């Protein structure tokens, strides 16, 4: 592999591009923009000069520079750039979903490092037929390594104003209320340290809610202190929500998925909810009790979204793709990865519940949560082919499962391997999953138990099984079981 290709391929992080900002030089970003425009034209069976591509950025200090360089590469391919400036990811990506609209974009690129530190930045991609896959990003980076770039024009557009108006219109539909201030009576604490948080606080105020702005604070403590109905925080690009209830308790992971599932299933039982693979046994039972079907799939927000879209194409009624990380995409919102829309959905339902003398969080009292849980990251020692090493470890576990009746492969083990256990006469009351990380050359091990001491009881025999492998660094597992 030539030196340029090697350098560019190191920027890939799953289906995104992500690295330290010093590795994302102006020339590198321009080449990526140039390659994306040409790749998009090939996918749409057109020429780059017929394309309009949206670009936007989060508030990271390097964002303006990276966006300008990326835009220069896109325009060098003769494509038009619609510059959304500082904006939320869903506001930008929404432009690709506007069927038949004159403002529709052919594709979009968000300059963002997601949940990572400010010195990490990169690009997330959206096309009219979904985001890029891991293989697409690999091809894109190979193209970028091969080509250098000329100069064209960039125009601007207020993506956030368009998005804000769409959210206002959606709130009226959700609340069945066309009043100017339909959220009067709702009280929300919002962490406004990010542009997404400040935008959402302003949106709720315009809709009539009372807002406490609590930038960079202990959101749970502040929510409880003010007596707010809930607290909300967003990652830099607005794609993920962190939520707490009126007591300040976090509503994240399985609890967030349970909350949103109830909101959908109380309107229409029988729906399928697609989640990532590390969700709990208790969540599956909870969704079933509310009349739904829990469908576990792979980690990675694009993975759950693609699977939900595929299920819908096959005639399965699947309105939601959601990860335990706080990423959520609704079918009614064009399956955009949109934490701000999720927050609006929760806020509207919370007001309805408040008017009925209850809280939106009340159903969570029936969610059975694990007594113990543990997550570990085991480095893959084979740097040449980590995916093959990962698969070999999975095969070792599967072979052991065939010969050990106490180990049962979960019927919905769709990523790595998920093994369930019946401890002390219970049924499926403990499990572990071992899978390859979406972004890093590590295997992620997650275990849960509904009884005390259960995590150690399922991880100890796993350690005995893989302790002598030269494929993984199992020291974190050894330390975990003592």
Image (cartoon, helix red, strand yellow):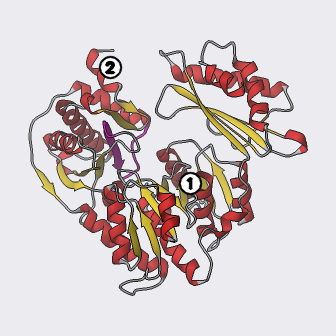
Residues under numbered marks 1 and 2 in contact, where contact means CB atoms less than 8 Å apart: no
Residues drawn in magenta? 118-133
Give me the residue at 49% from left, 62% from top.
Answer: 331
Above or below, 444 relative to 311: above
Residue neighbourhood size for the residue with mark 1, other residues' Cα within 10 Å, grouped as few (<14), some (14–19), many (≥20): some
Left or right, 300 with respect to 288, comes to: left
Q: Determine if the magenta segment contains residue 126.
A: yes
Picture coordinates of residue 234, whole percent (x, y): 41, 55
> Which label number is shown at residue 6?
2
- Kindly state the secondary structure of the residue where label 2 is placed: helix
Quarter of the rendering occupied by the N terminus: top left
Q: Determine if the magenta segment contains residue 342.
A: no
Q: Residue furthest front?
A: 225
Left or right, 328 with respect to 281, comes to: left
- Kindly state the secondary structure of the residue where label 1 is placed: loop
Marks 1 and 2, how far apart at CA: 38 Å
Left or right, 52 with respect to 257, comes to: left
- Asked if residue 197 shows in the view, the reply is yes
- Which residue is identified by label 1? 252
Picture coordinates of residue 469, whole percent (x, y): 66, 14
Q: Which comes before the other along the chain, label 1 or label 2? A: 2
Q: Nearer the viewer, residue 216 or 33?
A: 216
Q: Residue furthest right?
A: 425
Above or below, 144 relative to 104: above
Quarter residue 461 falls in = top right
- Asked if residue 336 shows in the view, the reply is no
Picture coordinates of residue 274, whole percent (x, y): 59, 53
Quarter of the rendering occupied by the C terminus: top right
């Amino acid at each position: 592999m030539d030196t340029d290709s090697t350098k560019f391929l190191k920027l890939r992080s799953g289906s995104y591009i992500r690295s330290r900002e010093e590795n994302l030089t102006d020339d590198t970003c321009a080449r990526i923009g140039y390659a994306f425009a040409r790749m998009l034209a090939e996918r749409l069976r057109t020429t780059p000069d017929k394309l309009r591509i949206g670009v936007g950025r989060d508030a990271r200090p390097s964002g303006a520079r990276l966006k300008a360089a990326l835009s220069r590469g896109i325009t060098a391919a003769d494509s038009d750039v619609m510059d959304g400036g500082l904006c939320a990811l869903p506001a930008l990506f929404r432009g690709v979903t506007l069927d038949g609209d004159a403002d529709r974009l052919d594709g979009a690129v968000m300059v963002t490092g997601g949940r990572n530190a400010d010195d990490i930045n990169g690009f997330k991609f959206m096309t009219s037929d979904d985001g890029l896959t891991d293989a697409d990003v690999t091809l894109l980076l190979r193209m970028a390594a091969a080509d250098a770039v000329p100069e064209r024009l960039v125009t601007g557009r207020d993506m956030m104003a368009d998005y804000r108006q769409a959210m206002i219109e959606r709130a009226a539909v959700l609340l069945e209320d066309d009043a100017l201030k339909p959220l009067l009576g709702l009280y929300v604490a919002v962490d406004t340290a990010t542009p997404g948080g400040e935008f959402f606080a302003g949106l709720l105020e315009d809709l009539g809610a009372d807002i406490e702005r609590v930038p960079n604070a202990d959101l749970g403590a502040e929510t409880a202190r003010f007596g707010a109905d809930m607290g909300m925080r967003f990652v830099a690009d607005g794609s993920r929500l962190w939520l707490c209830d009126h007591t300040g308790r976090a509503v994240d992971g399985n609890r967030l998925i349970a909350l949103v599932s109830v909101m959908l299933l109380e309107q229409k039982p029988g729906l399928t909810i697609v989640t990532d693979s590390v969700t709990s046994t208790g969540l599956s039972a909870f969704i079933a009790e509310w009349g739904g079907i829990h469908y576990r799939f792979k980690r990675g927000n694009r993975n759950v979204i693609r699977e939900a879209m595929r299920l819908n194409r096959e005639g399965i009624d699947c309105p939601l793709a959601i990860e335990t990380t706080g990423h959520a995409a609704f079918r009614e919102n064009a399956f955009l990865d949109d934490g701000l829309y999720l927050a609006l959905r929760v806020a509207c339902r919370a007001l309805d519940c408040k008017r009925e003398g209850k809280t939106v969080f009340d159903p969570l009292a029936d969610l059975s949560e694990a007594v113990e849980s543990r997550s570990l990251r085991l480095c893959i020692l084979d740097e040449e082919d980590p995916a093959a090493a990962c698969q070999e470890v999975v095969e070792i576990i599967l072979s052991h499962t065939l010969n050990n009746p106490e180990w049962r492969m979960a019927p919905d083990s769709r990523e790595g391997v998920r093994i369930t256990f019946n401890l002390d006469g219970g049924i499926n009351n403990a499990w572990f999953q071992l899978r390859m990380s979406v972004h890093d050359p590590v295997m992620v091990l997650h275990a849960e138990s509904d009884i005390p001491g259960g995590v150690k009881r399922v991880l100890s025999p796993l350690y005995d099984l893989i302790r002598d492998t030269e494929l993984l660094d199992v020291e974190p597992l050894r330390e975990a079981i003592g």
